[in-house]
Every structure is written in structure tokens, then in C-alpha cells.
Image (cartoon, rainbow, N blue to C red):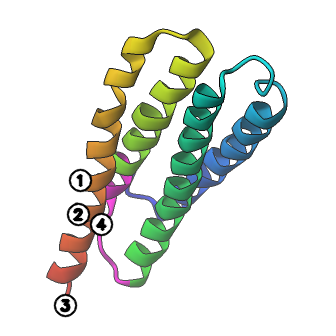
């Protein structure tokens, strides 16, 4: 994922999915999930959307400062898939051990942002 155009396109699709997931949760799942699980769904959507926007930002800033953003972008993408994905599956399936996977996605988010910051500091 070193091509900024591809990263931005992926982020755009992820944002569309986040909007759809938010609407799905607000309408289709509202009556079938407990308030706690609905809150979990909303958390998944929020992290999904914010980090998809962040992925766009990483690509744009990477282009502006001419830095390679492959690792930060990959880790943010992995974070979305693992963090939000595990919460989506948890809510839809009720299989509680999916919640144990969620922190791995959080670590991917944190690591991606730290790597991005380090790369910016290292760039003249």
C-alpha cells in the first residue's frame, strides 16, 4: 500500500462501509441488540470511520512530505479490519470471544500512528 491514490480509494470505500454500518446499526439492529451491544456497534463504527479518514490523511500527508507510508497505512487498515471487524462480528453473532481479538486492532492503530509520527520526524 505505497500508492497514495490506492490508499485514498480504499479509505473512501471504507468510509462508505462505515456509513452503511452506522445506518444498519441505527435501523436494522436497534430492536435486536441490547443497549450495551448497540453501544459496542456504535464504537466499532466510530473507530472505523475515524481511522478511514485518518488513512486518507496519511496518504495525503505522505504525498505532501514525500514519505513512504506503507507500514502506517497497512497498520491502520489492519486496525480497522481487526478492531471494528471483531466488534461487528461480536454484535452480529453473540460470540463473546471475538471481543478478545479487538485489542489487537487497537495495538495496530496505535503502532500505525506512532510509525507515521516517527516517519514525519525523520523526514527533513
Secondary structure beneath disc 3?
Answer: loop
User: Relative to 41, is 16 above or below?
Assistant: below
* Residue located at (54% from left, 19% from top): 89
* Residue located at (46% from left, 41% from top): 80
Q: In the image, residue 68 lies at what x, y percent?
A: 30, 66
Looking at the rendering, which quadrant does residue 94 occupy?
A: top right
Residue extending furthest right? 27
Choose mark 1 or mark 4, whichever is in front.
1
Choose mark 1 or mark 3, whichever is in front.
1
Tell whether position 101 is magenta.
Answer: no
Secondary structure beneath disc 1?
Answer: helix
Q: Which residue is mark 1?
A: 111
Tell whether position 68 is magenta.
Answer: yes
Looking at the image, tell me whether mark 4 or mark 3 is earlier in sequence order: 4
Q: Which residue is mark 2?
A: 114
Is the residue marked by circle 4 packed among few (<14), some (14-19), or many (20+) residues within 10 Å?
Answer: some
- Label for residue 124? 3
The reply to whether callout 2 and callout 1 are in contact (CB within 8 Å) is: yes
Looking at the image, tell me whether mark 2 or mark 3 is earlier in sequence order: 2
- Label for residue 68? 4
Q: In the image, residue 65 lies at what x, y percent?
A: 35, 83
In the rendered structure, the answer to whether residue 109 lies left or right of residue 46 reads: left
Amino acid at each position: 500500500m505505497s500508492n497514495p491514490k490506492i490508499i485514498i480509494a480504499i479509505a473512501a470505500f471504507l468510509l462508505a462501509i462505515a456509513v452503511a454500518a452506522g445506518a444498519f446499526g441505527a435501523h436494522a439492529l436497534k430492536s435486536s441488540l441490547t443497549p450495551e451491544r448497540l453501544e459496542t456497534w456504535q464504537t466499532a463504527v466510530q473507530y472505523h470511520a475515524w481511522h478511514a479518514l485518518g488513512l486518507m490523511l496519511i496518504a495525503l500527508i505522505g504525498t505532501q512530505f514525500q514519505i513512504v507510508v506503507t507500514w502506517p497505512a497497512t497498520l491502520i487498515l489492519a486496525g480497522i479490519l481487526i478492531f471494528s471487524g471483531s466488534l461487528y462480528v461480536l454484535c452480529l453473532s453473540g460470540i463473546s470471544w471475538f471481543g478478545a481479538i479487538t485489542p489487537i486492532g487497537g495495538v495496530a492503530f496505535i503502532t500505525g500512528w506512532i510509525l507515521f509520527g516517527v516517519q514525519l520526524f525523520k523526514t527533513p
